[in-house]
Amino acid sequence: TFDGLSLLVRFRYFKSALCNSSRKVIHSIQQSVTVIESTPSYYYATKMFKNITLGREIDEILNFDLDGVFETNLVPYSEILPTGIMRGLPRFGHTSNFAALFSSRDDAIDYIQGLALASIIFLSCFLFWGILILIFKYLGARRVGFLSGTAFVRPEDPSINYKRPFICRMIFLVSFLLFVVFSVLFNSEGVANVYGTVDTVQKSAINLAAYSSRVTDVLIDLARVGESAIRTGEEMNSLLEDDAGTKCLLDTGGFAGGEGLSVIENAARALSYLGNFLPPDYDGLIETSEFLHKRIEILSAEVTKPKLGKPYFLIFTIFYIIIPAVLLVGVMSAWYEVDARRLRCILSWLVLPIFCIQVFFASILGVIFIIGSVANADFCSGGKEQTPNDTVTQILRNLGVNPESTQFQIFKFYIYQCQSEHPFRSVEEYFSQLGSSELQFQKLVDALSSVDASLPGSGQNYTRLLAEINVPCKAYAEQIYRITDTVIYDVKSLLDIVVEIFDILKCDSVVPLYTTPTYEGACKQSVSGLTWIFAGFVVMASMGLIMVMLRSSWQLDVCDSDVFDEDEKEGVEYSGANHQVAVYLSDETAEELKDNGDQHSSTRSDLGNNSSSSSKSLRFN
C-alpha cells in the first residue's frame, strides 16, 4: 500500500487530484504509528513516507524558481469603439465615474442623475414624435393632408408631375429596410455578444470557484501540518534543552566530528525561528481566502442560474420583422394601384395598432438599454488611465477596504498584472527559513547517525542491532533521532505545501481569472452587445415612427375631383405646389344647388371666373 501510494503521488498527472487526500493519509499514518514508535514499523513507515511530498523531491523543492512565479505575459487593455461612443454621451455637469455608485449617497445620486438625463432626452424625443402624430391625426386632412393618415390627393391634370406619393413610399421602404436590418443586428450582434458575456463570466466563475477551493484546501493543509509540526517541535525542543542528554552526546566520541555543540545549537535556533511553523501573516492569508471563497460561491450561484434561451430572442426578432412586412405588402399594393380594400382595412385596424405597440416598447427598451450601455462603458474607462483596473481599485476603496491591508494589496497586484512588487515577501522568507531549518535538522540527524553505526537508519537490520547497541545514552540518542526525523518530514511537507502555494499564486494562473471576465467579457462583449441592443431599439423606434407617420402610403391615391370627406361637413385640402383647391360642400348645400339649377350654373360660372383670376381651380362633388 505504501509503495502504491508513493507511486501514485509521484505521478504529475494525478498531483492536483490526489495531493490533498494523499497528504491526509500520510499524516494519519504518521499520527497512528506514534503510538508504537518504539517498534521497527515506526522507522519503516517514517523512512517510507518522509520523502513523499506531492511527487516532488526535496532537491526540487529547495531549487524551486521563485522568480518565475510572478512573471507574466502582459495582456494590455484596449478600448473598443462603442466604449468611447457611449462614454462620450453628455452628462450635463454630472459625474461619469462609475465607482461613485459605491461611494456616498450624494455621489451615487449625482452619477444616476447624469444617466437619467441622457435617457430622459431620448424618451422625450420619442414621446414628442408620438404626440405629434396624434396631433396630425386630430387636425385631419383639411389642415395637414396626408400626414393625418388620409390618402394622397393627385391633381386631375396628368401633365403635373406629382412626386409626393413616390417619395413618401420610398422613405417608407427605406425605413422598413433599416427596421429589419437593425432587428437582425439586435439578435446577431447584441444578444449574441451578451450571451458571450454570460458564457465567459460563467466559465470564469467556475474556474475562480475551483481556484478558491484549491487555495482554501492548501491553506488548511498548511495549518494541519503546522499543528503536527508544533507538537513534534515542542518535544524536540524539550529534548534539546535536556542538559544531561546533550552533555552525554557531546561526550560521545565521533559525535559531529567535534562540532556537536554547534550542530545542537543551530538546530535549536532553527526550531526557535520556525515558531509555530506557519507564515507570519497566515491569519491574513486565510482571512482573505475565506472572504474570497464566500463571495465567489455567491457569484457562481448567481451567474450559473439558467438563462433565457436564444430561441426566445429569435422569436422576438421574427415577430418584430413580420408585422412591418405586412405593412410593406399594403404599401406595394397601393404603389401598383391594386385595390385591396380588405387588406387596407386589416392594416389600419389590426396590424397598425400592433405595430404601434412594437414601436412603443422599442422606444422604452432603447431608453433602458442606453442606461446599461453607458454605465458599462463608464466601468471600463475609469480613472486617469481610463481602464477597468482603476474602476475596480476605486470601488474597493469606496467599499471601505484599507489600501494598506493584505487583501487590497493582493487584489491590486493581480489586477495590474503583477507589474509591481509582490505582496508575498513574508511567504518567501518563510520558505527560505524552512529550507535552512531543514538543513540544520538534517545535520543533527547525520550527527546522531555518526555516534554509532548501530543507530536506526544505518542500513543494518534494526532488530538484530537493537540487542547489540552498547552506546552511552543510547535511549536519548534514539529518541532525539526519531523526533528530529519526524520534524524533518513535517518541514519537508511544509516546504512542499509552500511550493504548492507559490504554484497557485503564479501570475500566469491568477491574472487570467481577472482579465478574461473583465477585459473580454465586461469590456468587450458586454459593451458591444448592450450598445448594439440600444442602437437596434432606437433605430427600430425611429423608423417605426416614420412608418406610422407615412401610413398614407398603403392607401390608394385619389384624384382631386373624387375627394369627399364623409367625416367632415365642409373642408378644404391643399394638394401641393400646384395650389389646386378641392372644396367639400355639405349635403344641404349640394341639395340647395340642385334644386336651384339656374342659380347653381350662375354660381359655378362666377366661381370659375374667380378661379381663373386667381390661378386656382375649384371643383364640386
Image (spheres, rainbow, N blue to C red):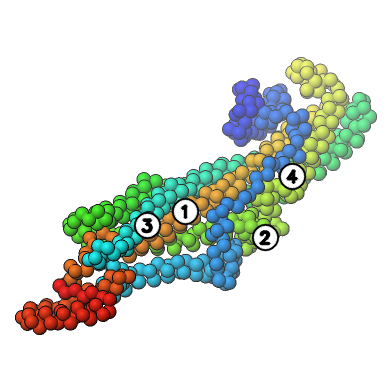
Mark 1 and mark 3: Cα distance apart in space: 18 Å
Q: Which mark is residue 427?
A: 4
Q: Which residue is mark 3?
A: 175
First-in-chain label (1 vs 3): 3
| Residue 191 seen from this side | no
Q: Who is closer to the viewer here, 438 or 444? A: 438
| Residue 315 seen from this side | yes
Q: Nearer the viewer, mark 1 or mark 4?
A: 1
Mark 2 and mark 4: Cα distance apart in space: 33 Å
* Residue found 67% across the figure and 60% down from its top: 384
**Label 2 crowding class (10 Å Cα cut-off): few <14, some 14-19, many 20+?**
few
Q: Is residue 185 above or below residue 437?
A: below
Secondary structure under badge 2? loop
Mark 2 and mark 1: Cα distance apart in space: 27 Å
What is the quadrant of the C terminus in the image? bottom left
Across and down, in percent, residue 496 comes to 70, 35
* Residue found 58% across the figure and 45% down from its top: 516
Across and down, in percent, residue 137 comes to 28, 71
Q: Using the rendered view, name the quadrant where residue 582 is placed.
A: bottom left
Q: Which residue is mark 2?
A: 384
Q: Who is closer to the viewer here, 90 or 614? A: 614
Q: From the viewer's perspective, tell me whether residue 21 is left or right of residue 308.
A: right
Q: Nearer the viewer, mark 2 or mark 4?
A: 2
Mark 2 and mark 3: Cα distance apart in space: 42 Å
* Residue found 12% across the figure and 82% down from its top: 602
